[in-house]
Image (cartoon, rainbow, N blue to C red):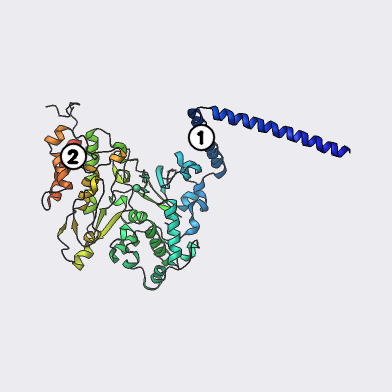
Amino acid sequence: MFSSELRSRKREINSDNMSQIHFKLAGTAARLRQMSKRMKCFFLCLLFVSIFIYGNIFWYLMSGNHLTTDSYLETDKCPACYGHSMCRTLYDNRVKMTGWSTMRFFDMVNRKNVHYAHHAGGKRNIVLKKLGHDKELVDWDERICREAGRTAPCDVTRMVYRTNTAREISKIDLQPRHLKGLSFMFMCPTYRLIDYALKRYKEVVKPDLVLFRDKVQFVATAMMNSEPLLLQTFPASEGWPFPEYYGACGRFIAVSDEGRPLQEFYNSPFEKRADLAYQILKMADLLTTHHQDFVLYWTDLSYENLAVDSAGKVRIIDAEHIIVVDKKSISKVRPKGWDDLLESTFDDCGGKNCLNFNVDGLCSHTHSDHNYYAACRNLLSKFADESAQGMPGGLLHDMPKYARNDFDLEYLLNECTRPSSSQKRLHVKDDIINALDEIRNLKMEKDPKSGERES
Ligand SMILES: Nc1ncnc2c1ncn2[C@@H]1O[C@H](COP(=O)(O)OP(=O)(O)O)[C@@H](O)[C@H]1O
Ligand SMILES: [Mg+2]
């Protein structure tokens, strides 16, 4: 009797509590419904910001420096990775993420997988890149599985040795056809290019010795993104306009932080933009003529793929889409028209900004004006229209009168993009370089309204 009374009393208390909760929830819901749209948005934003901040604090406190963990770096996937030359430095906690990158939460929105960090040893700011979006990295794994005859997901660490290419490398060594078309750097590979690249390849297990394992890793890297191979083969230390390559660890590479992307300079004073344009054209020259055997060609030239450092120097920060052509091999093989100048033909792409290129042509000619075409077409002239991104008219937009009249700059840029006669582009690019050099050095006062120089 006593226990059944107790049970019914408990039930009453429980149902009282439940009805109170129901009542309170209903009250809150009613109050929410009565709120204006603006207030609702405000509370929603507040909720997201709180989750974001607390989530980050929690994650940050729980995870420490994730650059010291193999699971984050994905070193367990090697040699289906970029290498390991940087691992010691990372494990020793000498590299720390900075800014947003310290927050693991941020990885969810960091689609490009680019992180900013500070290298205590080198006392430099560096950029850590995975060289692809998450989906592209998954595709990389799947491709390795497929080429090894396995269904994905598979153990890429083992399967990368079982692809047809890896089997052939073990038997007959690495050949141009194993790399052909895997990435832009190897659109037209030759033995000379492979030897040259392997000689400079830092990601080898034993210094000065390229083992079978290293070649498998080299090919796996080319399959995903040839940027680290290009940065090692044509290093900044030898005058190439790229970031310095510090090394790799698992599926990250570390390069020097080259500053702010070019688009941030779109509204800079004209003389500053003239200086940047000058450097871009000089870069086109350098890619074309710096090496006696190899030419490098731009195929993806855009504001976001160039950066300007604190000293005002421009560099190419995205080297994934650069084609390397072996001039010496071409002059030996002598395909038809090999020593004629290959002139890039203008394509207006329906009024959009685009860069057309002829891979077969570039791979079979020792001379081409393509890099100058790329610079004028995609960045400098009025055809480099990025209206969708709020950047119409090219980097040299709103040209002052003196530049147009005294230096003929607008005409020269149009001729560089769409030459009116054969071989003209090669002539006008020098005129543009000279004009820009003078303009960037102009220190005299200008009339801000007319843009004309004071006499
Ligand atoms: N070395 C670098 N220095 C400074 N910023 C960089 C560097 N590398 C990449 N970034 C930044 O990351 C962005 C994306 O890098 P990028 O290599 O171009 O990747 P994606 O191939 O996805 O375009 C760049 O637009 C730039 O803002
Ligand atoms: Mg890019």
**Residue 446 percent location from the top left of the image:** 18, 27
Number of the label disc, if any, that sits on residue 366 = none
Question: Badge 1 local density, few (<14 within 10 Å), some, or many (20+)?
Answer: few
Q: Quadrant location of the C terminus?
A: top left
**Residue 237 percent location from the top left of the image:** 31, 50
Figure quadrant of residue 144: bottom left
Q: Secondary structure at mark 1?
A: helix
Q: Nearer the viewer, residue 22 or 272?
A: 22
Q: Secondary structure at mark 2?
A: helix
| Lower sequence index among marks 1 and 2 | 1
**Residue 12 percent location from the top left of the image:** 77, 34
Tell me if label 1 and label 2 are in contact, CB under 8 Å.
Answer: no
* Residue, far right: 1
Residue at position x 75%, y 35% from top? 14
Figure quadrant of residue 340: bottom left
Residue labelled 1 has its Cβ within 8 Å of some atom of ligand 1: no
In the image, is 145 to the left or to the right of 2? left
Q: Quadrant location of the N terminus?
A: top right
Number of the label disc, if any, that sits on residue 49 = 1
Q: Which residue is mark 2?
A: 437
Q: Nearer the viewer, mark 1 or mark 2?
A: 1
Question: Badge 2 local density, few (<14 within 10 Å), some, or many (20+)?
Answer: some
In the image, is 92 to the left or to the right of 351? right
**Residue 186 percent location from the top left of the image:** 31, 61
Residue at position x 40%, y 45% from top? 127
Report how far apart the C-alphas of labels 1 and 2 lie in the structure: 48 Å
Total labels: the figure holds 2
Instruction: Name which residue type carries label 1.
Output: Val
